[in-house]
Amino acid sequence: MEFEPTKGIYLQIADSICEKILSNAYSNGDKIPSVRELAAETGVNPNTIMRTYTELQSAGILENRRGVGFFVGPEAKGIILTQRKQQFFNQTLPEFVKQAKLLNISLDDIWANLKEKGGK
Amino acid sequence: MEFEPTKGIYLQIADSICEKILSNAYSNGDKIPSVRELAAETGVNPNTIMRTYTELQSAGILENRRGVGFFVGPEAKGIILTQRKQQFFNQTLPEFVKQAKLLNISLDDIWANLKEKGGK
Amino acid sequence: MEFEPTKGIYLQIADSICEKILSNAYSNGDKIPSVRELAAETGVNPNTIMRTYTELQSAGILENRRGVGFFVGPEAKGIILTQRKQQFFNQTLPEFVKQAKLLNISLDDIWANLKEKGGK
Amino acid sequence: MEFEPTKGIYLQIADSICEKILSNAYSNGDKIPSVRELAAETGVNPNTIMRTYTELQSAGILENRRGVGFFVGPEAKGIILTQRKQQFFNQTLPEFVKQAKLLNISLDDIWANLKEKGGK
DNA sequence: GTGGTCTAGACCACC
DNA sequence: GTGGTCTAGACCACA
C-alpha cells in the first residue's frame, strides 16, 4: 500500500477505514481486520495500526471487545459524517474558495477541468 | 510574528514571501531582506530563514548574489503561479470532489451557493 | 573520517554515498545508515548528515520512510550517472579543452600519451 | 558580466585577465584598466577588483606604480604558463582521466563529442 | 556587511 | 528507534 509522505500513516489508514464505513463496505457491528492482519496486509508496523484503532475508538467510531477484536460502533457512520461535514464546511470549502480566488480560477474553469477528467 | 504550530516555520515564511511577490509587494529583481534582517524582524533563528531562502532559490523563485543578498528571480511570479495551479488541480480539487461525494453533497448546490455569495 | 577543507562536508558525504551506490555497495531499495548512525560513525554532526540525505532525496537518489529510515531509490544509479555525465560533457570537458588550447598543448599528444598508459 | 556562483568572483576576474595576457590582448608592460574602470565595466564591487589585482601582484603577474595604475609584469606570461601547466598536469588531467574512467567514457566518445561541438 | 557551513543540543511526531 | 524542525552560537569566504 502506498502512503503520502506528508500525512501520518496512522491518519491515512484511519481515513481509509472511515471511507469503507461510509461506502458501506463495513456496516455497523461488523468486525474489522485484526491489528496483525491489517499490518501484514498494508506492510505497516502493527504499532501504527494499533494507534489508528485506538484513536478511532476514542472517537466512538470503533469498539473493542477484549480478546475478540475491533468492531464498527453503532453510531460510526453518523459520527464520521458529522465530523467530516464540519470539517468540510469550516475548512475544506473556505480553503478551496480562497485558493481559487487567489489563483484567479473561475467556477467555469473548474467545471471544464472536472468534465475533462470525468470523460477519461 | 506569529506562526501556526502545525506547519514548519520555514514554510510559512516561504509562503509569506511568495504572497508578497504575487501581490507585487516585491517585483522581479528586487532585493529582499537579508537573512539576518528578516531573522531579527520575525524573531526567528537566522538558520531557519536561510533554509527558507535556499529552498525558494532552488525552486527558481529567488536568486543569490554572493556577499550581496537575495533577489526576486525573473520568473518568480510565473513559477509560483504554475506551482500553485498544479497543486490546485492535482490535489485540492480532486480531494474536494471526493469529499463532497462521500458526504453526498451535490456540487451543483455548492456552486449555486458560491455564485450567490460572489454576487454580494 | 577525514574531510577536505575546501568542499562542504555534506557534499563529500553525498559523494561517498553516490560512489557506494555506483559500486554496488548499496543496491536499489537498500536501507542506508540512519542519520544518527552515520553521524556517530563519521564524527559529523547529525544535522550535517541530515542535510546530505535531504539533498540526495530531493535529487531522487534517496527515498524516505517516516520513522523507518532512508533507502536507495529505484532510479538512483541512473540519476547519478546521468548527472555526472552531464557535468562531464558540459563542464569538465570544455574546460579541459579550453585550458589545453590556452597552454598550446595538442590534444593529439595527450591522447597518444593516455593510450600508451592505458595499454600498461 | 556573468559569474559562476561556485567560484569566487575575484578568481574569475583574475582568470579573465590571465587569459587576456596569454592571448596577447595584454602585453608585457601594458597598463590594465584601473580598479574603478573595471569595477564599473563588470558591475562588481571595487573592493573585489582590488583583491584580484593585489593577488595577481603578489604572484608577480601584475605590477603597481603608485598613483599611476597596475601594469602587466615583465614575466607575466611565463609565470602564468608555468602555473597553469603545473595545475594542468597535476590536477586537471588526472581528474579528467579519473572521471572518464569512472563514467566508462572512452576516448572515442570524447572525440566524437568534440567533433560534434566543433562542427556547430 | 552578505551568504554558507558546521556544531551542539533540544523537542516533536511518528513507527 | 526513526526522521524533521528549530534554536543558539560560532566561524569562514566573499563583496
Image (tube, coloured by chain):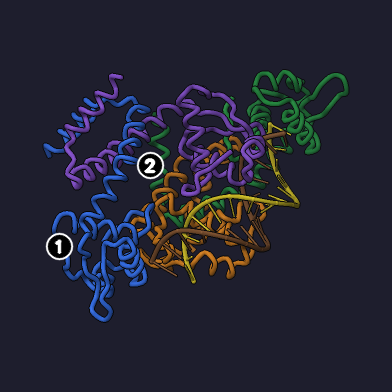
Chain colours: A green, B orange, C purple, D blue, E yellow, F brown
- Of residue B14 and residue A77, the one placed in the foreground of this image is B14
For the residues labelled 1 and 2, the Cα–Cα distance comes to: 69 Å
- Secondary element under disc 1, as helix, strand or loop, is loop
Give above or below for E13 relative to D66: above
* Numbered mark located on residue A112 in the image: 2
Which subunit holds the residue at mark 1? Answer: D
Q: Position of residue D24 (x, y in %)?
A: 13, 58
- Of residue D15 and residue D6, the one placed in the foreground of this image is D15
Q: Position of residue C116 (x, y in %)?
A: 25, 23
- Circle 2 Cα neighbour tier, 10 Å, few/some/many (<14 / 14–19 / ≥20): few
Determine if residue C75 is in view. no
Q: Which residue is mark 1?
A: D27
Dividing the picture into quarters, in which one does residue B5 lie? bottom right
Dividing the picture into quarters, in which one does residue C115 lie? top left
Task: From the viewer's perspective, tell me whether residue C35 is left or right of residue B50.
Answer: right
| In the image, farthest residue toward the bottom | D67
User: Where is the N terminus of chain D found, in terms of image quarters?
Assistant: bottom left
- Secondary element under disc 2, as helix, strand or loop, is helix
What residue is rendered at 26% in x and 49% in y? D82
